[in-house]
Image: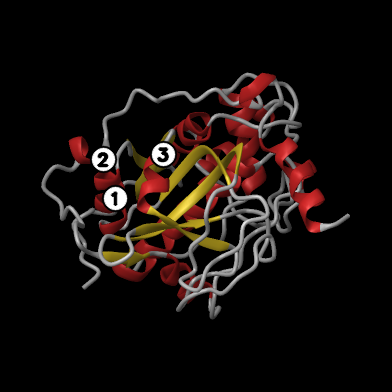
């Protein structure tokens, strides 16, 4: 199957296909915006920050690679990457323990079924459901637990039936909850969140199938499909834009990367990002310990 056909097929997995919204009708959690929650932090205006180097240092890798989803779990992929980055930041700046990368399958089942009420794994979920799940239930890691082996990614491991059948996993997950979830609705809030070390899970209908990065690492949208991304950086000077990480592996897009830009990531112009923000949440205060006024420089 050629790459474009593969990506077209992958799109069908992004969310349940039910009409023009592909099964994903944007929803909003009843939470305040980032700037309402943290009105006194650095607003990030005129700055430029990327967050993925924190995770790269923890993992001992030169450049972050993009995970390649095998089903309709883009929301859990984006949510888990943002949580991994948040944890890595706390390890680096607060000398906390690194517990390993998150088992995305746990987040997919939790968001789609435990919170969303579905009974199977074959489809997508609302970003708000995944965010609510990690906030209330917490996360588990790529380990061989007594009740489930999550060491290697396996989409079928998302099928947990009734999560209450896993009391030990529930107990372990509760130790690692996401303490603070805030809405991001504007470019200014995006800048403030990333500047203050809070990666963002984004849901959008703007697509980049078949796009190619330009010499500055930016890509232009060309289609419409619903998908979840991780926002892991921003630039509010020069050519303004945000750095978006995908979950289709490193080779879903061609064209040059700039600096330490991951191969599976694209820079997207500010004007496009402002259209893309349909549903977005900044993740911070992992297990209730990260103050958002920690400075990068």
Label 2 environment density (alpha carbons within 10 Å; few <14, some 14–19, many ≥20): many
Residue annotated with mark 3: 275
Image position, residue 48 (x, y; %):
29, 66
What residue is pinned by disc 1?
193
The foreground one among 109 and 258 is 258
The residue lying at 19 percent from left, 57 percent from top is: 45
Place residue 121 in its image quadrant: top right
Image point (51%, 45%), residue name = 79
Can residue 169 be seen in the rendering of this structure?
A: no
Which quarter of the rendering shows the C terminus?
A: bottom left
Query: Would you say 51 lies left or right of 150 here?
Result: left
In the picture, the disc for residue 34 is 2
Circles 1 and 2: CB atoms closer than 8 Å = yes
Percent across and percent down for residue 32 are 26, 30
Q: Is residue 50 above or below residue 35?
A: below
Residue 268 is tagged as: none
SS type, badge 3: helix
Asked which secondary structure carries label 1, the reply is helix
Where residue 92 appears, as percent x and y from the top left, is 35, 70
């Amino acid at each position: 199957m050629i790459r474009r056909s593969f990506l077209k097929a992958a799109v069908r997995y992004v969310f349940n296909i039910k009409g023009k919204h592909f099964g994903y009708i944007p929803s909003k959690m009843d939470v305040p915006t980032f700037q309402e929650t943290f009105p006194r932090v650095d607003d990030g205006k005129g700055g430029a920050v990327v967050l993925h180097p924190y995770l790269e240092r923890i993992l001992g890798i030169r450049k972050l690679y993009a995970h390649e989803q095998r089903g309709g779990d883009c929301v859990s992929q984006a949510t888990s990457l943002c949580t991994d980055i948040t944890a890595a930041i706390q390890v680096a700046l607060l000398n906390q323990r690194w517990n390993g990368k998150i088992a995305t399958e746990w987040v997919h089942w939790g968001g789609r079924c435990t919170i969303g009420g579905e009974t199977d794994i074959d489809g997508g979920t609302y970003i708000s459901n995944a965010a609510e799940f990690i906030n209330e239930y917490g996360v588990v890691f790529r380990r061989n637990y007594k009740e489930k082996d999550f060491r290697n990614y396996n989409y079928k491991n998302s099928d947990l039936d009734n999560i209450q059948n896993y009391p030990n996993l529930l107990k372990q997950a509760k130790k690692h909850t996401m303490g603070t979830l805030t809405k991001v609705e504007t470019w200014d809030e995006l800048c403030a969140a990333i500047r203050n070390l809070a990666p963002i899970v984004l849901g959008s209908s703007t697509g980049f199938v078949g796009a190619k990065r330009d010499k500055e690492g930016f890509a232009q949208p060309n289609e419409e499909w619903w998908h979840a991304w991780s926002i892991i950086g921003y630039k509010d000077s020069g050519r303004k834009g945000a750095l978006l990480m995908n979950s289709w592996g490193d080779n879903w897009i061609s064209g040059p990367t700039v600096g330490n830009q991951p191969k599976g990531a694209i820079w997207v112009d500010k004007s496009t990002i402002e259209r893309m923000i349909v549903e977005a949440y900044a993740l911070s205060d992992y297990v209730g310990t990260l103050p958002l006024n920690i400075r990068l420089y």
